[in-house]
Image (cartoon, rainbow, N blue to C red):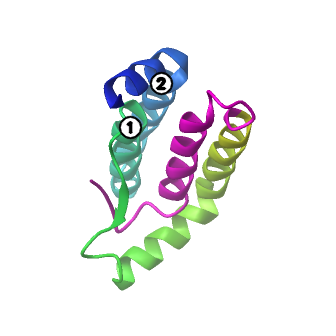
């Protein structure tokens, strides 16, 4: 069932979302300061490409001071917009019964997009 969900996800926009995250992650990696943020976007891109069967969990370094500082910078410079986009898409997908699983995946991505530092995908 996860395979079918992932294939449908890719066909109906998941590939576009993953490419978007990956390309902007590459752009951020061109600068030394942007490398940590670019790596987080690439992590989100991998999750956006194949979300069914994966969960977002707190990593072992979740409580570190550096993770908190990086998440604050992330939220200020774009994390809120990305998370709100995923929340909006999740609400739109949850309007229909067929779209509920896809809406739930967008809600998981909204959580990861809001505070990606210190999170792992299992």
Measured as percent of width and height from the top left, residue 93 is found at 67, 33
* Total labels drawn: 2
- The magenta segment is 93-122
**Residue drawn at the location 52% of the way across and 53% of the way down:** 113
How packed is label 2: few (under 14 Cα within 10 Å), some, or many (20 or more)? many
Disc number for residue 117? none
Q: Quadrant of residue 57?
A: bottom left
Examine the rendered structure and indicate whether residue 5 appears above or below residue 42: above
The residue tagged 2 is 9
Who is closer to the viewer here, 105 or 25?
A: 105
- Residue 121 falls left or right of residue 88: left
Q: Is residue 23 magenta?
A: no
Examine the rendered structure and indicate whether residue 11 appears above or below residue 36: above
Q: Earlier in the sequence, mark 1 or mark 2?
A: 2
How packed is label 1: few (under 14 Cα within 10 Å), some, or many (20 or more)? many
**Residue drawn at the location 63% of the way across and 64% of the way down:** 76
Q: Secondary structure at mark 2?
A: helix
**Residue drawn at the location 62% of the way across and 30% of the way down:** 99
Measured as percent of width and height from the top left, residue 100 is found at 61, 37
Rendered-image quadrant of the N terminus: top left
The residue tagged 1 is 52
**Residue drawn at the location 35% of the way across and 42% of the way down:** 42
Question: What is the residue that sits farthest to the top in this orientation?
Answer: 11
| Mark 1 touches mark 2? (CB < 8 Å) | yes
């Amino acid at each position: 069932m996860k395979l079918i969900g992932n294939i449908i996800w890719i066909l109906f926009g998941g590939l576009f979302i993953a490419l978007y995250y990956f390309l902007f992650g590459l752009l951020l990696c061109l600068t030394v300061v942007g490398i940590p943020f670019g790596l987080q976007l690439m992590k989100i891109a991998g999750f956006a490409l194949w979300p069914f069967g994966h969960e977002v969990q707190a990593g072992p370094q979740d409580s570190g001071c550096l993770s908190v500082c990086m998440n604050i910078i992330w939220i200020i410079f774009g994390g809120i917009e990305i998370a709100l986009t995923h929340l909006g898409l999740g609400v739109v997908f949850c309007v229909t019964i067929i779209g509920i699983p896809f809406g739930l995946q967008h809600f998981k991505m909204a959580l990861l997009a809001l505070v990606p530092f210190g999170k792992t995908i299992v």
